Image: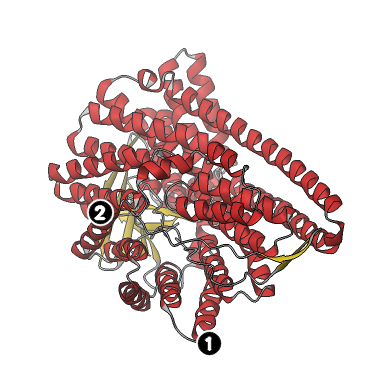
Amino acid sequence: MKRHFSYRALPHRHRVRRFAAVLGFAALILSGCREYAPDVPEVKPGEIPETVLKRYAHTDAVLARLNDLKDTGQRLDSLFYYTELLANYDDKAAMVYAREAGRIAETGSLRLARAISDYYIALFTGRQYILGDEEALEGAIVNAANSDQLFKKSNNTEWHIKAEVLLGHLNFKKGDSTAAKEYFFNALKGLEIADAANEEQDRQKGEIFHELGNLYYYSFGDTGKAIGFFEKGKALFEKTGYQSALARLWLDLGLVYFYEGQYAEADSLSQKSLDYGRKNSDIKSVIYACQQLAEFKRTAYLQSADPTDIDEAFSLLRESIRLDEDNPYYTLQLLGSAFSSKAKMTKAYNNVDSAIIYYKYAVQEAKRLGAPKIMEPLVENISYLCGFRQRLTQRDCSELLDNAGMSFLNKQYKELNDTIVNRLQLASRQSKEFAMQLQETENKHRVNNIWMTSGAGLIIAGFVFLILLQQQQQKRLKAKMEALRAQINPHFVSNSLNAIESLVNHDQKDAAAKYIIHFSRLSRQILNSSRDGVTTLAEELKMLEHFLALEQLRFRDKLNYRIDVAPDLENQPVELPAMILQPYVENAIWHGIKPKQGPGLLLVKVEKQDKSLICTIEDDGIGREKAREIKAKSLMQHKSVGMQITQERLKTIGHVKDTQVDIIDLYDDQGQPSGTRIVIRLPFKIKKMKPA
């Protein structure tokens, strides 16, 4: 299954149930000491009508009313209640209330209230990682760690365990499986040594087992243990009647069953989550279940060509986009994928147009959110579909994108850059305002000078940590880019630019335009391939198509090529090392076909044999022996940097089972060299997408 999306694990719905005891901190104020114990009732999904939730989501009006309350405790009670109330309905509004509670707690030196605020801020900020915002994830970890320290100092076991679970979840998203595992098991240990088990502790254990299920499946690859943890969590949620958490678990367990090929179980669990969400007005559950089921139906359609499957997918996505008004980019992306799949099966240009339009809307939403990482695959899909449309209708995408395709995409990236700059400027202003508030608070509450100074120091240390972390990430990115530049053959770049110049000089504008498009797309895909070191077969072949199209434009009738992919591989996200085929293809063209008299044929074939992926690259050129003779006599020897790096990479993975490269010399009936065949055998592996 080719997954254009990164499926989002449903976020924690850590409930603030009832603060039955004093929060454990005596806040010093000018008038003396007092205790603060907020009491927030439990809110179950569906208990509050959506019309009421919408009213609370209008934060300006609600905050204006809260300002009339003189009692600090009442204001904090209300703010934490609204935060919890909207936690599964509107993240942005919930974040506003959490930040306001934190401001009041900071002003009144209410340490535990501030810790609870930091916990919620970490929870909501961490969800932004869905959009590829790594800085937001690091910031969430810092906030969660700060809140955890304050909970420990206040001896508040319940909130300390919640913070440990959140830290485990955030570190899992970050990719630090060791830290995540430690946090989860520390939280479990804390629950087990508690004085007496109760319903709340059972629910917390269920949350931890759910998290461990995801961790063991996606990070450790242990399907058996993962399902065991899921089942433990399921039993505890059923025991305590924690239906909203059970619905989230059904979705994640359904995704695991889907990856394991148990499609009936996957559909059944996802449908149960959807039924629960609809019945209880749990909007988040409905949205995620619709998205997941729609993707299942789209995959089934690609395998069965049954139109009812894709119709069901469209119906589910329409329901999702109706409910997801604030962040609809992901549903728009799935709609683009669904229409793209339908276009692939029907070859109808109207489906291509619909796919392009939905991807366009998704790009614009991603730009609005300031999320470059989710824009990149969308841009690639638009580029590919515009080429497909050109072949079908002989028309470009200007009428769909409001201007030329590349101009539209460049415009989106420029506006995204402006958005990010504006966000940074806003963050800088907010930081300065916050620093001023801290100074004013210190002046007003001199009796709390030591605590306030420590708090400010902690915040500054957090900012310093984030700045250093950002610098480190920039250094790593620069190192990746430098390594990437070493992979791009300078001869290829130079020859491409020379070819473009030649076409322009000979007034072959259409050919020059095609050359530029293929060159830019290939360059972008090479950049993308440097991030993880691995890619999917579909992306690798897409990059190969651009490269071969460029070479064919250069060599014209001299080069013919064909790419054959086994039907059972077309719709699967098969994982393989990035840029593993292109150097061999380049080598075959330059040393096999280019020196040959007359036209040559290059064949790339990909198939599955047992548990191996077999990639065959075959040319009908002059053969290796003749190529070596020509190379020895030539003063200008074509040297492939990419080939050298590929060979080094294959040496590194050479000890992996089922990894092998065979180079076979081909001969005709008269015993004369007739080409070369390269057979690359790699372990067959499906690329798994972590719940984000």
Are the residues tagged 1 and 2 within 8 Å (C-beta)? no
Q: Position of residue 97 (x, y in %)?
A: 57, 48
Q: Quadrant of the C terminus?
A: bottom left
- Disc 2 residue crowd, few under 14, some 14–19, many 20+, Cα 10 Å: few
**Residue 277 seen in render:** yes
What residue is shown with label 1? 193
What residue is shown with label 2? 279
Question: Which residue occupies the foreground of this view, 233 or 332?
Answer: 233
The answer to whether residue 538 is above or below residue 321 is: below
Question: Which residue occupies the foreground of this view, 374 or 237?
Answer: 237
Q: Position of residue 289 (x, y in %)?
A: 30, 53
Q: Amino acid at mark 1?
A: Ile
Res 96 → quadrant: top right
> Mark 1 and mark 2: span between their CA atoms?
37 Å
Secondary structure at numbered mark 1:
loop
Disc on the earlier residue, 1 or 2: 1
Point 64% across, 61% down: residue? 113
Q: Position of residue 204 (x, y in %)?
A: 45, 73
